[in-house]
Image (cartoon, rainbow, N blue to C red):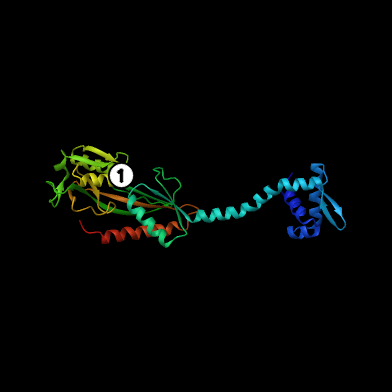
Amino acid sequence: MELLQLKYFYALAQAQHVTKTAEKLHIAQPALTQTIRRLEKELDVKLFRSSGRNIVLTECGEYLKERIAPVITTLDAIPVELEELEGKRQRTLKINVLAASKVIADTLIDFKKINDNINFKIVQNSKKEDEDITVFTRELFKEQVSNTEENYIFTEKIFLAVPKPSEYSDLKQICLQDVSEKEFIGLAGSKALRTICDRFCMYAGFTPNMIFESDSPEAVKNLIGANMGIGFWPQYSWGQPDTSHIALIPIEEPECRRDIVIQLHKKREMNPQAQEYFQYLKEYFEHLEIHQNHL
């Protein structure tokens, strides 16, 4: 049995009128008749019988109609479902967040308010496989010419975060070597920011004595504020600290900064909303830099 045969049979079984069915299917009447005859021959049963000028289903025809009705209904629904799926795909932005998660979360919330029809799929995948936009960090990102990617690079300083009051909290700047013997609190070793900050310590000639590690920046902030140790604090992406408990000290040596890279992946079927959100992120970071209090 061919699918076309079954579709023609089902249409004829509903109308039980050859001429009207052929018109509905936009085919010639002989073509419809021949298709039904081939189906009857293949099944070796009669599916219709004459009744005056019309035709009616035989018992076998009634059985076949009942059996294929769910299949035909499903097949007829597929084009509509695929259209809806494609529309949803085009309205869904895939964002790979490997850095600055707090800032990105804020932008997603704000962007969603003015683009309510857009959906977001947020992942954290270091392989950067099938996303529209990836946000990641490097100590110093070297941009290469590419036809498949467009990058916006936002640079932020990294400060030393110390409890208040403490022996360092009133300093205007500090050399990282001066705290080489202190206890540090920081992100877990798998985090890119942790790797960057460990490298700063290496430049200063020591390995930090890490007494507590966490996947959560909030936990790091709270423990520093509770006078449990010192740590590193990105200027913009972690926001302003509670100045009654934490002081941010500029690091004089080595130079401590990182690049946050927003990478737009230019795919053959690029999401039409991806460019819009990419531009929104650029403007958001520029606004953040302008309006953040100078530390």
Question: Which one is in front, 52 or 186?
Answer: 52
User: Quick one: label 1, few (<14), some, or many (20+) residues within 10 Å?
Assistant: few
Could you say where residue 91 lies in the image, as x and y percent from the top left?
48, 56
Task: Give the vertical position of 180 relative to 33 (above or below).
Answer: above
Residue 150 located left or right of residue 138: right
Residue 136 located left or right of residue 92: left
Could you say where residue 87 lies in the image, as x and y percent from the top left?
53, 56
Residue 41 located left or right of residue 107: right
Question: Which one is in front, 140 or 46?
Answer: 46
Residue 230 located left or right of residue 285: left
Q: Residue at x 25, y 52 (%)?
A: 235
**Of the residues shown, which amino acid type is indicated by label 1?**
Ser
Image-quadrant location for residue 216: top left
Toward the right, the furthest residue is 52
Q: Residue at x 25, y 59 (%)?
A: 292
Of the 4 image quadrants, the one containing the N terminus is top right
Question: Which one is in front, 274 or 241?
Answer: 241
Could you say where residue 141 lies in the image, as x and y percent from the top left?
31, 48
Report the number of discs.
1
Pointer 1 residue: 216
